[in-house]
Each structure stands twice: as C-alpha cells, then as structure tokens.
Image (spheres, helix red, strand yellow):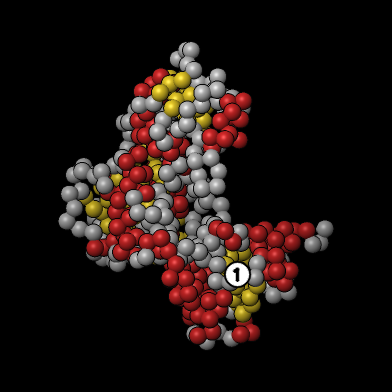
Amino acid sequence: MEPMSIKEIADALNGKLNNCKEDIMIKGVSTDSRKIKKDDLFIPIKGLNFDGHDFIENAINSGACAALSQYDIESSKFTYILVVDTQSALIKLAQYYKKKFNIPTIAVTGSSGKTTTKEMIASVLGERFNVLKNEGNFNNTIGLPLTVFGLEKHHDICVFEMGMNRLGEIEILASTVKPDIAVITNIGTAHIEYFGSRENILKAKKEVFTFFTSSNRAIINGDDDMLSTISNTDFEIIKYGLKEHNHLCAKNIKQQDDKGMEFSVTIDSRQENFFVPLLGVHNVYNALSAIAVGLAVNMDIESIRKGLQKFVPAKMRMEIYDTKDNIRIINDSYNANPDSTIAAIEVLKSMPSRGRRVLIIGDMLELGDYTEAGHRKVGEKAAESKIEVLIAIGDKAKEVIKGALSKGMSKDQIYSFKDNKEAISKISSILLSNDVVLIKGSRIMKLEEIADYLIERSYTKDE
C-alpha cells in the first residue's frame, strides 16, 4: 500500500477523527487483529458471530496505529475514525484508494472456473505487466477491498476475481474497482440456493457491467446458453468458445497425455497454436478468455502463448500426484458444483490408465431445490463415463449413488461413507495399483484429507 495520512482517510470517509495529535501515516489496512502489521489501520467488521470492535485494543497493541469504529469509544486513548458503518467504510476507502491508480482493471466472475481463469489471465498478463491479483478466496466484499490496498506504484494492471451469494454483491464489487474489462466464464448452478434460478444468477453476474460505457469490453463464454443471450449493449462484447460463431474459436483440441491441452485459434487470419498445462476441455475455455484479455490489452501472440505455458494451477485444483503404490490422484477438492464436477469427470474419463477410474465425490452444497437433481446428474455422468468405482462421502452424495444406479452402475462398484474419517479407514482396501482417482467435493467437505492420506500412506508405509 502507498502510505496515506489518517486525516486524508478521515476526509475520504467523511468520518470524525478522534485522539489524533499528529498526522499519522497509514501503511496498510487489515480487518483481522491477528494479522496486524506495524502502522496498519484496523477496520473492525461486525459479523453474524462476532464483532471486530471487540478486538480493537488487541489490534492497537499489536502495532496498528489507528482504527475505524462505528461506535463512539469515549474512554479510548488511541486514534480512531468514527464512521456510520465500518463495512461500508472499507468499501468506500478502497474505492477512494483505487482512483489513485490509472491502470487497466480486469474483473472475472462466473459460476465455476473463476479462480483458474483469473490465474490464467494473470499468468498471461505477467509476461508484459506487473500484475496485482486477489489471492485465495479474497473475492468478496471484504477480501476484494483488502486486495485493492495492495496496489502500489509499480503495478501496471490488476485482475480481480468477484464472487457472490446474493443479488447486488457483484455491483458493490464493481463499484469498488470500476473494471475496464469484465470476463464471465459461465452461468451454472453454483449458489443457486440463494438465487432460485439460472436466470437470476445471470442477472447477478451481469452486475459486473453496471458501470460500463462504450469504452469497456465484456469477454464472455459464447457457448454458454445463458451468456449467449447478452446482446445489443453499449459496450463491446467479445465471445469465445468452441463454436464457429465466436470471435475466438478453439479448434484441433488435443489432450497431451496427462500434461495439458493443446489447441489452435485463428487470430488475424492466422492459425495460432497454444498449450495450457491443465487437463480438460473446460480449461481450454478458461485459456480462451485469457487469450482474449491479452489481445484486448494489445499483447503480442508470443507473450500470450508463453504466459499460458507458464501457468501454474492453484492448490487443490486439478493437482496430479503419483503415489508409490502407482495410484494416480487428481486432487480437485477445493470446491464443487454439478457443472464443475461433470467437467472433472470428463478429465478422469480421458486420463490414460492401466487400471480403474475411481470417483471420490463429497456433498455439493448451496444447491437449494436443485440438490437432489444436481447430485443425481453427477452420478448419471459417472455411470455413462464408465467410471469403475464410485466412492460417495456425506449424506447428499448418496443421491450421486442413485443417479449412477439409474444408469446401470452395479452396486458392487459403489461405496458410501458418512465422513472422511470413515472413508479413510476403508479406502486402502478399495483402491488398487494403477487406479486413477478423482477427488471432488464442496470446500466444507475438506476432501483434501483423502488426498493427503493417500499420498502420505504411500510414502510412509514401507518406512
């Protein structure tokens, strides 16, 4: 963060500055009293289960030089700014700070593939620019503003992933960073519990365009049935996909063993070849969006190509491990919804294997009325894809079993466990040498515990 004076911050927030004897310089912003650095501004957030105001003194004692507060702290001796609402103040301050940087801003949203797409875009842009991007799950109305404060003079461009679980949230995020380019990966069923329909999810995702003018660009998946309906806008739309009507169309798609995907795209009447080191046709879509962004900011083809080749996937997203038992693990356990799981099953189906293909699937959450149908759809896909072993973990995952049985999978191929602990106690007797195992489930299921067990067991059992 570029230092700002406490008085500048108070003015930007229309707040009342208290106990300020000199113009303190703020060098960072934090909402977590446990992660305070010297000269930070602490912004306490009031949540459902806790109130950050209870930790203001802890933050000050840990090195914060000032705080915001939505309560008048009469007995305090430390510097603080009184505001109406600290959550709103966090966003307002991020808006103010972002305006100090006249650099291109890319927003990425969608029902699935957001993080991978954001990382691919950042990898491509990194060949030419110094890039700021949000890390981990810093894609909400707290995490994204905090990411903004990471902007410094050396940055040339920024890429922000935007998540949501309610209408209006993307609009707030868009107001915070005012993107020049917005990417929407797809409209699926993730978080449909909160929206009721894909139509409402589309409406929420389109909030990323709220502040667009004729100078802005939307980069969207033109093969998506919902996104393809977006037209007649005041801003430019660039569509990507596998179908001919798209501006960027991937052809000659091939999986290069277990290394990644190669494909070609016609750009300026020339066929250009690309490779992305991640499996699955769905990752060709993600790569196409990164190519589109690179072209939109006038990057040369060779730099875009190098950026894709250098891409490193985030942890627990299509990570491939080979154990000493000759079991190949595809750890895609970071999160799951029916659409992303079906895409992952396609990867499992295409993997070279001398053994069986095994799906370990956990509960997929936030599906609302679509819970049963979504899980059954995954089971049907597993059976149709000739998956030889299905291991379901959790109550909701039992619906995956029903879907698999309805499409002819034998009961002898199916196992069901209530939790990871029970699964781990039995899984060694189920898996065989040369099996290829896909692990997928919602974040709360923590199915990486299964992957960790299989890897650690392989490396410790003979020691």
**Residue identified by numbered label 1:** 394
Between 31 and 423, the residue placed more toward the observer is 31
Residue 330 in which image quadrant: bottom right
Residue pushed farthest right? 463
Q: Residue at x 70, y 69 (%)?
A: 422
Q: How many numbered discs?
A: 1
Q: Is residue 332 left or right of residue 115?
A: right
Between 335 and 165, the residue placed more toward the observer is 165
Q: Is residue 348 left or right of residue 122?
A: right
Q: Is residue 386 visible?
A: no
Circle 1: element type: loop
Query: Residue 37 location in percent, x, y?
Result: 57, 28
Query: Residue 170 location in percent, x, y?
Result: 35, 49
Query: Residue 279 location in percent, x, y?
Result: 49, 62
Within 10 Å of disc 1 (Cα), the crowding (few <14, some 14-19, many 20+) is some
Between 311 and 183, the residue placed more toward the observer is 183
Q: Residue at x 36, y 23 (%)?
A: 11
As displayed, is residue 30 above or below residue 121?
above
Residue pushed farthest front? 74
Q: Residue at x 58, y 65 (%)?
A: 439
Amino acid type, label 1: Gly
Query: Residue 404 location in percent, x, y?
Result: 52, 81
Q: Residue at x 17, y 56 (%)?
A: 232
Q: Is residue 332 left or right of residue 370?
A: right
